[in-house]
Amino acid sequence: MTDVSIIGNINADVIARPVDRLPPPGTERTVESIELRVGGAAAIAALCLAALGVSPELVGSVGDDPVGKLLLEQLVAGGVSVEGVTVTPGTTSICIATETKDQDRSFLIAPGSHQPLSTHRIPDSALSAGYVLVCGYFLLPALRGAVAAILREVRAQDGETFLDTGWDPGGWSSETKGEVLGLLPWVDAFLPNELEVTTIAGEQDVCDAGWALQARSGSWCIIKRGSGGSSALGPGRRELAVAAPAVDALDTTGAGDAFNAGILWARVNRWPWEEAASFATRLASTVVSRPSHDRYPGWDDLRRA
C-alpha cells in the first residue's frame, strides 16, 4: 500500500515581487524579480515530502504544452513520481502570484488543465493509501462533486483523510460554504488558513471558527496562521497553539502547502497530532526562508535551521 497520495492541482507559479500595486493602464513598472517554478497545492506538497524522503503518489493533470513538459521534468528532478499525472490536450494551468512585505499575497489563476481531472483518472492505489490529501478543491470542477465519495472510500480502507480546499474564487456563497461543511465528517484533518476558517464558519474569531468546524468533523481542524504559527483543535477540546520560529521570509508562496506536507510526514511517522502541527509549522517556516531555486529542505537542512 502506498503511504501517501496527494490528489489536486498542479500548475506553473509565476511569482512577481515586490508588487504593492499594478501600474496604471498603458504603463510599465520594473520589479525586483519574476520567477517561474512548479506550483499548485498538490505539487508543492509532493515536492516537499520527496525532499524529506517520502515519495507520494501525485494525482493531477497538466497540459500537453511546453509548460506542462517543464513541470513534469521539474517534478521528476525533485524526486516525485509523475505516473499518476495525466497529460491532457490544451494549456497547463498557470498561477500569477504577487508578493510584497506589507500585505498578503494575491493570486490570478487560469485553471486550464485542472478542469478535466475527474474520478476516472484517479488510480485505485491512490485511494488505498494510508494517508490521502485532497487539495485545490475549487479549481477541479470535474472532481469537485466526487470528493465526498473519495474521502469515504479512503476511510473505508482505513486511511486517514486530509482536506485543504483553498480559497473559493467564486466568493463563498452560502451554497459553497454548505458544500465544504458537508465534507468535514469524512475528514481526519481540515487544513484551512485564518481567512478561510473564519469565512466558512461565519465567525470573526479564528479559534471560535476553528472549533465550529472541528465540531462538524469530530476530528481535527488545524489552522495555518502565517507568521503567527498554527492552531490545532481536536477531539475532547484538545488544543495547541504553535508559535512560528522567527525567520527572514524570502518567498511565502506555497507556505501552506509545505505545512500540509509537514502534517502528512508526521502522521506517516505515527506522530501525535499536536507534534504534527509543531513539525508542520517549523517546516513551513523553513521553506519560506529559502530561495526559489533551493526551496525544499531535507533533514540535514532542518537540523541546521
Image: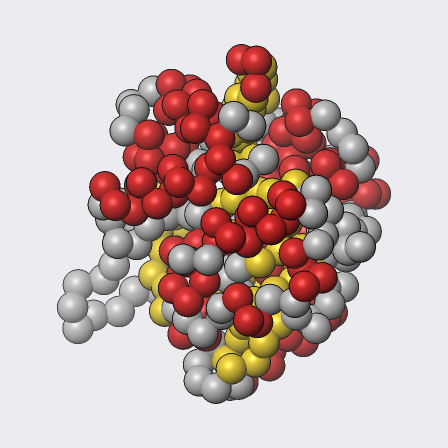
Rendering coords of residue 222 (x, y %): 53, 30
Q: Tell me the quadrant of the picture where the N terminus can be found.
A: bottom right
Residue at 73%, 46% (x, y): give it.
130
- List the single residue furthest toward the left: 25
Determine whether 171 is above or below 225 in the image.
below
Measured as percent of width and height from the top left, residue 12 is found at: 50, 68
Q: Residue at x 41, y 67 (%)?
A: 142
Residue 54, given in percent of the width and then of the height, sits at 78, 51
Left or right relative to 71: residue 15: left
Label total for image: 0
Q: Is residue 131 left or right of residue 186?
A: right
- In this view, the residue in front, 218 or 299, is 218
x and y percentages locating residue 5 in the rendered image: 67, 55
| Quarter of the figure with residue 262 | top right
Q: Is residue 8 above or below residue 204?
A: below
* Residue appearing at x 63%, y 49% in the figure: 154
Query: What is the residue that sits farthest to the top in this orientation?
Result: 237
Q: How is the image coloured?
A: secondary structure
Quarter of the image with the C terminus in it? top right
x 30%, y 35%: residue: 199
Residue 265 seen in render: no
Horizontal side of 188 relative to 50 (left or right) equals left
User: As displayed, is residue 165 above or below residue 81?
Assistant: above
* Of the pair 48 and 150, the residue shown nearer to us: 150
Q: Is residue 165 visible?
A: yes
